[in-house]
Image: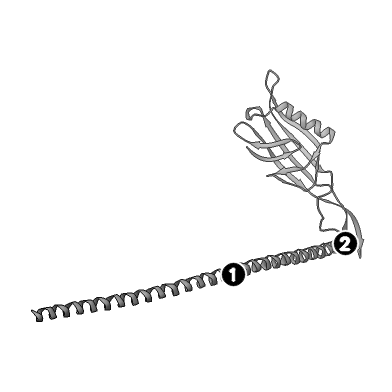
């Protein structure tokens, strides 16, 4: 559903089942003035702003899904009771102040033979009934000064708060860095101790292995020498036996 505008529960919209539109939107703003004369010249001086005013014509038709009679008479009742609300267009306030429905005029009514309202137009007039939201450009100098002072104070508070927050964050960061450094140092110390111990054990094992190899070499050499001597002795004995024969 595409909502074009809305006011006080009345929705001007376009959808497959309902079309409730309006035409002739007029927005009016003016000032109350007074005539002044100076050096033979007349000019006007502003006294106050007049209420902003919006006028539009709602077009109601039963063929597009509207309950023509009830909707038209509701506008009339709200104009009599002075209903007020913000006027929204495209989801945003058209004017940043509430508008009162001051007049609703029904015209061009088409009624079926059985009394059913087929269509009509309702001219609506809404006027400003509250101050504009926010601070306007016509604010007094004292108000501007006060606003400036307030802004400055707010800026100082914000600066102090930011500085304090930054200091806390830095302290926290330093604490975290210190803790990490301590943990790294402890781990490094343990690693160093473990490496030294392992190196010592490896060195001892290597020495033992070297000694075992040397002993094996000596044993092998002795065994070889003994074998050679035995063979020589046996050969000599054989030769002697041969000579004796």
The residue located at (78%, 39%) in the rendering is: 125
Name the residue nearer the viewer: 209 or 162: 209
| Coordinates of residue 80 in the picture (x, y in percent) | 84, 32
Q: Quadrant of the N terminus?
A: top right
Secondary structure under tag 2 reads helix
Q: Quadrant of the C terminus?
A: bottom left
Name the residue nearer the viewer: 222 or 74: 222
The residue located at (91%, 63%) in the rendering is: 40
Instruction: Tell whether label 2 touches label 1 (CB within 8 Å).
Output: no
Left or right relative to 126: residue 207? left
Residue labelled with disc 1: 188
Q: Quadrant of residue 135?
A: bottom right
Vertical placement of residue 164 versus 111, above or below: below
| Coordinates of residue 149 in the picture (x, y in percent) | 86, 64
Q: Residue furthest front?
A: 244
Left or right relative to 165: residue 191? left
Name the residue nearer the viewer: 245 or 8: 245
Task: Tell me if mark 1 has few (under 14), some (14-19) or many (20+) residues whose alpha carbon lies within 10 angstroms of its own.
Answer: few
Residue labelled with disc 2: 146
Left or right relative to 54: residue 4? left
Q: Earlier in the sequence, mark 1 or mark 2?
A: 2
Task: Tell me if mark 2 has few (under 14), some (14-19) or many (20+) residues whose alpha carbon lies within 10 angstroms of its own.
Answer: few
The mark found on residue 114 in the picture is none
Secondary structure under tag 1 reads helix
Left or right relative to 191: residue 241? left
Vertical placement of residue 47 versus 199, above or below: above
């Amino acid at each position: 559903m595409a909502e074009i505008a809305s006011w006080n529960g009345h929705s001007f919209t376009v959808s497959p089942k309902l079309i409730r539109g309006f035409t002739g939107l007029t927005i009016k703003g003016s000032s109350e003035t007074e005539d002044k004369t100076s050096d033979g010249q007349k000019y006007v001086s502003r006294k106050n702003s007049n209420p902003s005013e919006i006028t539009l014509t709602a077009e109601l038709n039963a063929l597009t899904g509207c309950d023509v009679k009830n909707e038209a008479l509701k506008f009339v009742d709200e104009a009599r009771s002075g209903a007020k609300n913000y006027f929204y267009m495209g989801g945003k306030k058209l004017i940043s102040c509430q508008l009162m429905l001051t007049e609703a005029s029904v015209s061009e009514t088409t009624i079926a033979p059985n009394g059913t309202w087929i269509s009509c137009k309702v001219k609506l007039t809404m006027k400003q009934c509250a101050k504009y939201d926010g601070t306007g450009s016509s604010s007094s100098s004292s108000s501007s000064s006060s606003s400036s002072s307030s802004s400055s104070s707010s800026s100082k508070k914000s600066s102090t708060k930011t500085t304090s927050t930054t200091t806390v964050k830095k302290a926290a960061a330093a604490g975290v860095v210190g803790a990490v450094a301590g943990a790294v140092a402890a781990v490094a110390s343990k690693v160093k101790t473990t490496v030294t111990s392992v190196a010592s054990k490896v060195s001892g094992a290597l020495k033992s292995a070297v000694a075992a190899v040397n002993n094996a070499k000596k044993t092998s050499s002795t065994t070889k020498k003994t074998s050679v001597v035995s063979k020589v002795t046996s050969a000599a004995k054989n030769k002697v036996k041969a000579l004796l024969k």
